[in-house]
Image: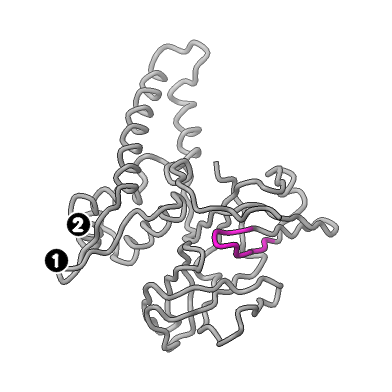
Amino acid sequence: MENPPKTTLSFDSALGHEPADKRIEILRLIASSGSISQAARQARVSYKAAWQAIDTLTNLAGVMLVERAVGGAGGGGAKITPAGRQLLAVSVRLAESRKQVLAETQAPYKGKLTPSLAAPVLSHIGVRTSMRNQLPCQVEQLDATGQVVRVTLRLAGDARLVSRITKASAELLDLKKGLAVLALCKATAVRVEAHPNGDAASRTPSGNKALSGRVARISRGATGDEVSLQLDGGLQLVGFAAAGSGLKSKARVNAFIDESAVVIALAA
């Protein structure tokens, strides 16, 4: 029997974006201010968006980057972890290296990319996405039926998620058992419900089992309650519960994601 994927330090994924990524900026502001709310104000984003930035970086890095601190401004604050400081240090070095590489493109063309060609290429290398859920995982199984492939993905904590994609997409990504990938999905594609006692095996209509965890934060809304939860394996996930769900912080919940809503991306 294979060993389940471990939660490991992986700055490659966390830093696989444009160095000016807002998420890195927010982490840096938290380090200097010791406050999530202050970092959000300085970065000109909402408090909720700031937490989402940290949750995503935490998923990609595979280690806790920020911890809540008791007794800060307004009754509580945030403390960046040693791993968080290491990530920031690495980001600075990458930014410096990037400047050096870009400077080289300013030289006369000698088999290198000219600035006019380099700009659009570099701008797409660090593509960012509106999909707030980015979950590191491994390909566990591929089941092809006609032109459709069901890809079983193994997440931290030994949870499983299934993505239904086309055969062509699987071939272009060169998906293989054991390959490290990212599972992406919109927060609006995740349905969150209270965890029924003794029923952790509920499924979506398409077959995906529920992902279980606990509510970390919740934002009430007239059309639905936005729920940030921590899965049992430690990953962060955002979804929506029905308006007036009554869910509270630390409550046990199940998250449901339809197979067709799960997008697979290469982790590196």
* Residue type for callout 1: Ala
Q: Position of residue 60 (x, y in %)?
A: 46, 51
Q: Nearer the viewer, residue 250 or 217?
A: 250
Residue at image position (74%, 60%) is 150
Secondary element at image label 1 = helix
Q: Main secondary structure of the magenta part?
A: strand
Secondary element at image label 2 = loop
Q: Position of residue 259 (x, y in %)?
A: 67, 66
The mark found on residue 14 in the picture is none
Q: Position of residue 22 (x, y in %)?
A: 34, 50
Label 1: how many residues lie within 10 Å, few (<14), some (14-19) or many (20+)?
some
The stretch of residues the image draws in magenta is 154-163
Label 2: how many residues lie within 10 Å, few (<14), some (14-19) or many (20+)?
many
Q: Nearer the viewer, residue 85 or 120?
A: 85
In the image: residue 55, left or right of residue 191: left
Residue topped by disc 2: 34
| Image position of 209 with respect to 34: above or below | below
Residue topped by disc 1: 73
Q: Earlier in the sequence, mark 1 or mark 2?
A: 2
Question: For residue 156: magenta?
Answer: yes
Q: Nearer the viewer, residue 47 or 34?
A: 34
Q: Quadrant of residue 70?
A: bottom left
- Asked if labels 2 and 1 touch by Cβ distance under 8 angstroms, the answer is yes
The quarter in which the N terminus is drawn is bottom right
In the image: residue 240, left or right of residue 3: left
Residue at image position (59%, 45%) is 266
* Residue type for callout 2: Gly
